[in-house]
Amino acid sequence: MTQGWPERPRRVVVTGMGMVTALGNDVASTWDGLVAGRSGVDYIESFDASRLGVRIAAEARSFDPSSLLDRKDVRRTDRYVQFALWCAHGARVQAGLPERLEGDLAERAGAIIGSGLGGVHTLFDNVLTMGSRGPDRISPFFVPMGIANVGAGQVAIATGARGPNFATVSACATGGHALGEAWETIRRGDADLMFAGGVEAAIHEATIGGFASMKALSTHGADPAAASRPFDAARDGFVLGEGGGVLVLEALEHATARGATPLAELVGYGATADAWHITLPAPGGAGAVQAARRALDKAAIDPSDVDHVNAHATSTHEGDKAELAAIRAIFGDHAPKVAVTANKSMLGHTLGAAGAVEAIVTIEALRRGVVPPTINLDDPDDAGAGLDLTPNTAVRRDLRVAVSNSFGFGGQNTALVFRRWDA
């Protein structure tokens, strides 16, 4: 089928969502846990963490890929790829798409699914095998299981989507970039439908050891549930989490033609670089400010019309401080009226998955008129004075427009703007 190019950018809606987090294996269970203020952070169970100084994480303990994949495929896929397939399956089912895309639908569907670190378990475990037993003992699946683009490739294989397919890799901004670039792909006419999101399975002794060495992780080990404390004066670092989120993004006219029900509309996307420091944010969150302004400009939405911000808010001292400054700069006098929340207080920091996971939570907040709490916010940082940071208890709000922020090591920033679907 010949596809003509649109005369103007097309509207893009979300028609399906799938996720897995430390709070559950789907959107409903994760959402319920967040609204209840339940932490998914606990002592590590997936491996012996006795050699580590930091022994807590937000593990997806109940995740079982065998309910979707056969035994052979489980052995031949890294955990991050299993997350991608699981989340894409959930999104596909909610979107009302067939199990296998065929014909024009397959040609006009793609997948952009990123991971900050890729197949961490596969990579490290095979390096250890090489060191102890030699290179001839490396698994033949080492490379295809470990590289970061295979999640997107496996989703295409599973669904039949033959359109644009690649992975974004931008540390903790990965999921935001994946959604934004998928949005742009549809807007310009290169696809009608995209599976988009981020996944991460990085809870491994080497990864935690590395983050601990750079003093990025919380050392609140005595009370794991209280360790992730975004915006709190006593915050001392993030807690590593795992999981993923995949959304079906679709051109509005395509969704309407097949009778799909939009969940929300993605109306804006901005991406910038701090060009400042490999780990620290630019002073005042300058890059974050510019990303949000670009996203709002594309959406033709004034900052005074924004009701809610799902903050990146990792619970690091400098990162949270810069984001609070950015919120003040973006919204000015309107800032105190914006309901802000930090999901990482309960989910931990899922790195490359965070932008997609939090985009799904943002959409649910718009749909349900509820802002999940920022738990462990007992003594707010002075930098947050006068802002509505939703401490410890969920609140009901009439939400129409929301911004979801994601920022990555290297100074990479994204902002996504969602609008409630009221058709």
Image (cartoon, rainbow, N blue to C red):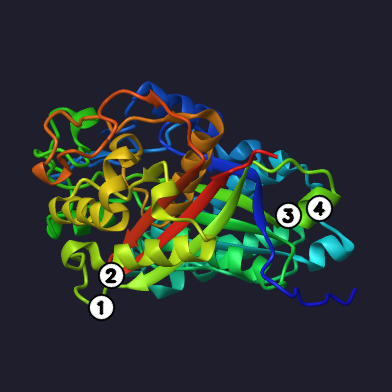
- Residue denoted by label 4: 100
Whether tag 2 and tag 1 are in contact, CB under 8 A, the answer is: yes
Whichever of labels 2 and 1 marks the residue nearer the N terminus, that label is 1
- Residue denoted by label 1: 275
Q: Nearer the viewer, mark 3 or mark 4?
A: 3
Which disc is residue 252 wearing?
3
Q: Label 3: how many residues lie within 10 Å, few (<14), some (14-19) or many (20+)?
A: many
What percent of the width, then of the height, locates residue 338? Answer: 34, 41
The Cα–Cα distance between marks 2 and 1, rounded to whole angstroms, is 6 Å
> Is disc 1 placed on a helix, strand or loop?
loop
Relative to 89, say whether 290 is above or below.
below
Whichever of labels 3 and 4 marks the residue nearer the N terminus, that label is 4
Amino acid beneath label 4: Arg
Camera-nearest residue between 236 and 295: 295
The Cα–Cα distance between marks 4 and 2, rounded to whole angstroms, is 39 Å
Relative to 383, say whether 122 is above or below.
below
Amino acid beneath label 1: Ala
Going by the image, does 276 lie left or right of 370? left
Asked whether residue 75 appears in the rendered view, the answer is no
Q: Nearer the viewer, mark 4 or mark 2?
A: 2
Whichever of labels 4 and 2 marks the residue nearer the N terminus, that label is 4
> Is disc 3 placed on a helix, strand or loop?
helix
Which disc is residue 411 wearing?
2
Asked whether residue 227 appears in the rendered view, the answer is yes
Camera-nearest residue between 131 and 98: 98
Whichever of labels 4 and 1 marks the residue nearer the N terminus, that label is 4
Q: Nearer the viewer, mark 4 or mark 1?
A: 1
